Image: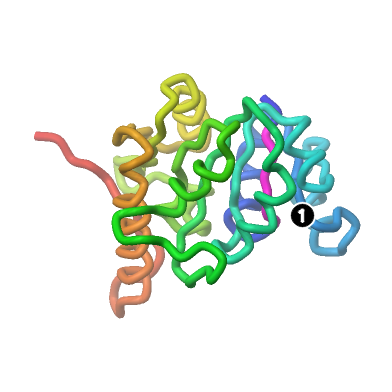
Amino acid sequence: MKICIIGAGNVGGSLGKIWAEKGHTIIYGVRNPLTPKVQTLLEETGHSATAELVKDAVQKSDVTVLATPWEAVGEVIFQIIDLKGKILIDCTNPIQPNPEWPLSQGSSAAEEIAKRLSGFKVVKAFNTIGAGNLSDLTFGSLHADAFMCGDDAEAKKIVSQLAKDIGFDALDVGGLRSAEMLESLAKLWITLAYQPGIGPNIAFKLLHK
């Protein structure tokens, strides 16, 4: 599968490297494909990964992963707003306020993105765990859960398989209106990760009796 990853930071880079190892074609969508940072990421990703301008990368992909800071999302949307029929995985978390997009109570970053990118099938996923854990999602005998939500069943099926490729147990929590809960869960993860005696080597898991 051709996967466009918008963002060359910790989350985007980690996902790209792992999916490349699993046989997927990785295209990083970036402002400038020729920067030393991006070139280093391509070398680390290997497997013939490429980098292109954001819109070009999205057009060539089957699935797009949005892995930028929340405050950078507006710039991305401006570049791809006219595209249609694409699956977009939203990994963002609105930790820092975005003056362009103030979130009303009860709304979420994912829902705001879906409103503006009406031609995309938006799935919220991969936002409730730190990038440092993505290379090894085994905690004892358990695998971390990848919580996801979205309004398109086929899109979620594809995202679920991508989650399993990484090593997650995939868990569908419903429609995109559930994204607010997942974004709150991410804030809980961040809070716990900075607690003395806990740290970032943690993940969420739904346990059954």
Q: Residue 97, how many percent across, how many down?
A: 48, 71
Asked whether the viewer can see residue 23, the reply is no
Quadrant in the rendering for residue 160: top left
Q: Which quadrant of the figure contains the N terminus? A: top right
Q: Main secondary structure of the magenta part?
A: strand
Would residue 89 appear left or right of 197 to someone viewing this image? right
Per the rendered image, the range of residues in magenta is 3-8
Q: Tell me which amino acid carries mark 1.
A: Leu
Tell me what residue is drawn at x 65 percent, y 49 percent.
77
Verify whether residue 4 appears in magenta: yes
The residue lying toward the viewer, choosing from 154 and 189, is 154
Asked whether the viewer can see residue 53, the reply is yes
Q: Which quadrant of the figure contains the C terminus? A: top left
Residue at the spot of label 1: 41
Tell me what residue is drawn at x 36 percent, y 46 percent.
179
Verify whether residue 106 appears in magenta: no
Q: Looking at the image, is 93 positioned above or below residue 182?
A: below
